[in-house]
Image: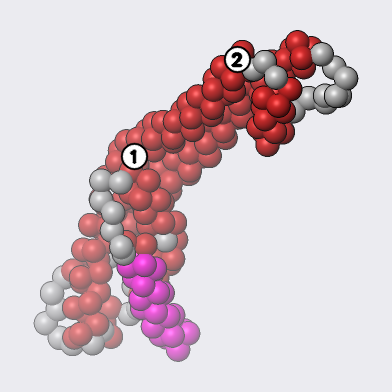
């Protein structure tokens, strides 16, 4: 049994080192006060918890009576570290919720800004349509609408007023499409954000409790020994 457990002990150290490398990669470069970076980074840290937990479990899978001095020192530190990490994960829950709200507001603001710019462009087309009096001016407007994918079919024999009416209908359709696309983007963004927030908050809660349980289950690692 000891021959089987000993390799697992060293594999546990390897998993912890790999986890540390991944955490450093997630944290560097830092961009504090940026809600998107904070939210995504917390998600990356939380998603690393299974590997860290398995690594800790395997590291502590050892006979306490056969510990080397340096091994005892490391295990004592890891036991206290498990408590600190567990508390950190639990404290990340409210921060994750706050950042999710901030990211939601920021994303909605970006969508609103993009829609506002497009609405201004539509209004400019409307103004030009009202002022258009020649076929050449209408053709220019038709090119603009064609780029937006809402250009109507116009024949050269149609009167100017009829062409203007069709263009006005096309502009109105473009506005409806713009509003529908903005609403779809907001709904998709909100759903994706909600799924991530729920997933990461539950992950932080479960992981935090498991880390604390590791600390509670390893009092022997924190006790000072007289014989090594």
Decide whether the magenta segment is chiefly helix, strand or loop: helix
226 is higher (above) or lower (below) than 32:
below
Quarter holding residue 205: top left
Q: Is residue 107 visible?
A: yes
Depth check: 218 or 58 in front?
58
Q: How far separated are the C-alphas under marks 1 and 2?
A: 48 Å
Quarter holding residue 77: bottom left
Secondary structure beneath label 2 = helix
Q: Quadrant of the C terminus?
A: bottom left
Depth check: 46 or 225 in front?
46
Quarter holding residue 175: top right
Instruction: Categorize mark 1 by other alpha carbons within 10 Å: few (<14), some (14-19), many (20+).
Output: many
Which segment did they paint magenta? 1-25
Depth check: 38 or 224 in front?
38
Instruction: Categorize mark 2 by other alpha carbons within 10 Å: few (<14), some (14-19), many (20+).
Output: few
Residue picked out by circle 2: 131
In the rendering, at what x and y percent does residue 225 appear?
14, 78
Q: Residue at x 23, y 63 (%)?
A: 81
Q: Residue at x 88, y 20 (%)?
A: 157
Which mark sits nearer the N-terminus, 1 or 2? 1
Residue picked out by circle 1: 99
Q: Specify whether residue 20 is painted magenta.
A: yes
Q: Is residue 141 left or right of residue 41?
A: right
Secondary structure beneath label 1 = helix
User: Which of labels 1 and 2 is toward the front?
Assistant: 2
Q: Residue at x 29, y 41 (%)?
A: 95
In the rendering, at what x and y percent does residue 39 appear?
37, 46
Q: Residue at x 67, y 24 (%)?
A: 137
Report the disc number at residue 166.
Answer: none
Q: How many marks?
A: 2
């Amino acid at each position: 049994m000891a021959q089987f457990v000993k390799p697992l002990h060293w594999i546990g150290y390897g998993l912890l080192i790999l986890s540390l490398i991944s955490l450093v990669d997630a944290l560097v470069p830092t961009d504090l006060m940026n809600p998107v970076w904070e939210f995504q980074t917390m998600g990356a840290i939380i998603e690393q918890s299974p590997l860290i937990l398995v690594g800790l479990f395997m590291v502590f899978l050892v006979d306490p009576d056969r510990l080397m001095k340096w091994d005892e020192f490391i295990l004592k530190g890891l036991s206290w570290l498990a408590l600190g990490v567990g508390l950190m994960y639990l404290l990340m829950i409210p921060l994750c919720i706050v950042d999710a709200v901030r990211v939601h507001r920021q994303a909605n603001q970006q969508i609103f800004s993009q829609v506002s710019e497009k609405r201004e462009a539509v209004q400019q087309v409307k103004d030009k349509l009202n002022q258009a009096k020649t076929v050449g001016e209408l053709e220019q407007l038709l090119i603009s609408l064609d780029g937006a994918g809402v250009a109507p079919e116009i024949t050269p024999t149609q009167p100017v007023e009829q062409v203007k009416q069709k263009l006005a209908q096309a502009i109105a359709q473009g506005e409806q499409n713009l509003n529908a696309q903005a609403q779809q983007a907001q709904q998709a963004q909100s759903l994706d954000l909600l799924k991530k927030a729920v997933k990461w908050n539950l992950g932080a809660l479960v992981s935090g409790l498991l880390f604390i349980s590791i600390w509670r289950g390893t009092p022997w690692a924190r006790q000072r020994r007289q014989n090594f």
